[in-house]
Image (cartoon, rainbow, N blue to C red):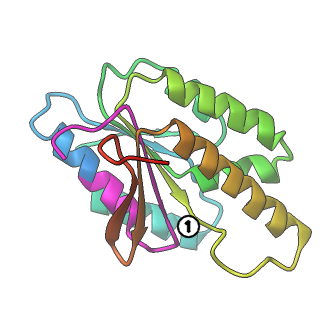
């Protein structure tokens, strides 16, 4: 792929390779550019294990990125002018978790995010976990999260020009301008 569409969604399970895929796509279009691509990190560091995960992601990306840390106001950050630079949002499910734990209105936050994504000039790649492939969670909070994540992924996929699902490090194209959908 020589150019990215305005909005791409990359889905996958935990440790599927979805973030690496997104980083590879962004790096390919940003190579040789005078300004770095933008990485919007939605995670929050609450413990040593999460600190290790964040450090690993930073090490894998390398130094050629501008990082913006924003656990909640993703719509606001996406409203900034990044000068046409490619933007990677990693990840939507952590962003959703942050809002869920803060007891925010998930539907309102998701609606604002979708509107912001549609206004972006792109290219933007959003990474999100597919959490609906397993068993039904045994508690109400986990079921609420799973359902909200499923609705968010569907909404972002609907406005994306390209959607990929990554399993075992292998990307599968689910939606593309060159594919016919019924």
**Residue 30 drawn above or below residue 85:** below
Question: On the picture, is 103 further left or further right than 58?
Answer: right
Q: Nearer the viewer, residue 33 or 52?
A: 33
Location of residue 116 in the rendering, given as x and y in whole percent from the top left corner? 57, 26
Q: Nearer the viewer, residue 161 or 46?
A: 161
Question: On the picture, is 42 further left or further right than 174?
Answer: right
Which residue corresponds to mark 1? 50
Would you identify the image quadrant in which residue 109 lies? top right
Residue 77 in view, yes or no: no
Please identify the residue farthest to the right as the structure is shown: 140
Residue 6: in magenta span: yes
Residue 97: in magenta span: no
Question: On the picture, is 178 further left or further right than 40?
Answer: left
Q: Residue at x 19, y 47 (%)?
A: 1
Q: Which residues are magenta?
A: 1-24
Would you identify the image quadrant in which residue 59 lies? bottom left
Would you identify the image quadrant in which residue 138 lies? bottom right
**Residue 144 drawn above or below residue 115:** below
Q: Residue at x 66, y 69 (%)?
A: 132
**Residue 52 drawn above or below residue 120:** below
The kind of secondary structure element at disc 1 is helix
């Amino acid at each position: 792929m020589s150019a990215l569409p305005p909005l791409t969604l990359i889905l996958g399970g935990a440790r599927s390779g979805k973030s690496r895929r997104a980083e590879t796509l962004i790096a390919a279009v940003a190579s040789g550019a005078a300004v770095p691509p933008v990485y919007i990190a939605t995670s929050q560091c609450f413990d040593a294990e999460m600190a290790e995960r964040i450090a690993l992601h930073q090490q894998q990306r390398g130094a050629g990125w501008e990082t913006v840390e924003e656990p909640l106001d993703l719509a606001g950050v996406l409203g900034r002018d990044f000068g046409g630079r490619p933007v990677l949002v990693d990840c939507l499910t952590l962003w959703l978790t942050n809002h869920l734990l803060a007891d925010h209105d998930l539907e309102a936050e998701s609606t604002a995010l979708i509107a912001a994504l549609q206004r972006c000039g792109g290219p933007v790649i959003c990474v999100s976990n597919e959490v609906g492939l397993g068993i039904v969670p045994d508690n109400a909070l986990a079921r609420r999260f799973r359902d909200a994540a499923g609705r968010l992924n569907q909404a972002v996929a609907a406005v994306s020009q390209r959607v990929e699902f990554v399993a075992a490090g292998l990307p599968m194209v689910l939606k593309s301008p060159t594919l016919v959908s019924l």
